[in-house]
Amino acid sequence: MTVGEGEYVTIVGPNGAGKSTAMKSVLGLTTYMDGSIALNGEDIAGTDTNTVVSKGVSYVPQSDNLFSTMTVRENLLMGAYSLEEVPEDRLREVLDRFPILEERQMQRAGTMSGGQQQMIAMGCALMVDPDVLLLDEPSAGLAPDLVVDMFDKIDEINDAGTAILMVEQNAKEALRRCDRGYVLVNGENAYEGPGTELLNDQEVRERFLGG
Ligand SMILES: Nc1ncnc2c1ncn2[C@@H]1O[C@H](COP(=O)(O)OP(=O)(O)OP(=O)(O)O)[C@@H](O)[C@H]1O
């Protein structure tokens, strides 16, 4: 799989295909037996997570992606934990990107709605101003109208220049929004191509998109 500069790439596929594992492998959060991982041409296989983040890759896990007893502001500052200094201007940019987080800065993260919690997690990941943002099922568990808001937010982040690699169960919407997509099956790329091409491919539709 590749993600180009500023590109928006989606991975879809059945449960257990290895989508989350692929992301965790990039971040050094799991072990793997084969394959290679490169960032800007540099081999980063086996690199520890902090170093991968410092090289411009950030990640929002599917669950357990925030500190529920800490405030929104504290959570965002934790996103910058790996940096030597808390970048005040970056905090400002993240709060501007998510106005609800600015309003609720002093609220405990665990008391906020599912959609808002997902925004906190995304805000945390953006604190390091990543070149590539990895998102594992950002729309999981959200009400349909919030799903649209979430995808709009991701579009905005991508439009601002951050490349996106996103795993999504909401496959049709994800493929509609992205530049390119992969359909992962049993740990292998079964199909790949521009999102709209996959969306219109009859075989992909029948096998993975519910017709
Ligand atoms: N290439 C692989 N080789 C061996 N085991 C793998 C591989 N990819 C994934 N697995 C194992 O398969 C299981 C499911 O993988 P993973 O959670 O990445 O799937 P997923 O596509 O993200 O599924 P879900 O949609 O349910 O989250 C995990 O236990 C993982 O360790």
Image: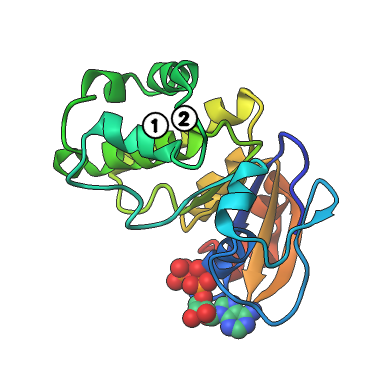
Look at mark 2 in the image and give the residue it sits on.
Answer: 153
- Mark 1 C-beta closer than 8 Å to ligand 1: no
Residue 183 is at least partly visible in this image: yes
Q: Secondary structure at mark 1?
A: helix
Q: Residue at x 28, y 34 (%)?
A: 74
Position in image of residue 36 (x %, y %): 78, 68
Q: Is residue 168 above or below residue 95?
A: below
Q: Which mark is residue 45?
A: none
Contact (CB < 8 A) between labels 2 and 1? yes
The Cα–Cα distance between marks 2 and 1, rounded to whole angstroms, is: 6 Å
Q: Is residue 182 above or below residue 129?
A: below
Q: Nearer the viewer, mark 2 or mark 1?
A: 2
Q: Is residue 168 above or below residue 18?
A: above
- Return the residue nearer the eye: 8 or 143: 8
Around disc 2, counting alpha carbons within 10 Å, would you say few (fewer than 14), some (14 to 19), or many (20 or more)?
A: some
Q: Is residue 27 left or right of residue 149?
A: right
Q: Quadrant of the N terminus?
A: bottom right
Around disc 1, counting alpha carbons within 10 Å, would you say few (fewer than 14), some (14 to 19), or many (20 or more)?
A: some
Q: Amino acid at mark 2?
A: Lys
Position in image of residue 10 (x %, y %): 62, 51
- Return the residue nearer the eye: 103 or 189: 103
Q: Residue at x 18, y 26 (%)?
A: 106
Q: Residue at x 50, y 64 (%)?
A: 210
Q: Secondary structure at mark 2?
A: helix
- Return the residue nearer the eye: 46 or 135: 46
Look at mark 1 in the image and give the residue it sits on.
Answer: 149
Position in image of residue 69 (x %, y %): 17, 45
Residue 119 is at least partly visible in this image: no
Q: Is residue 158 left or right of residue 143?
A: right
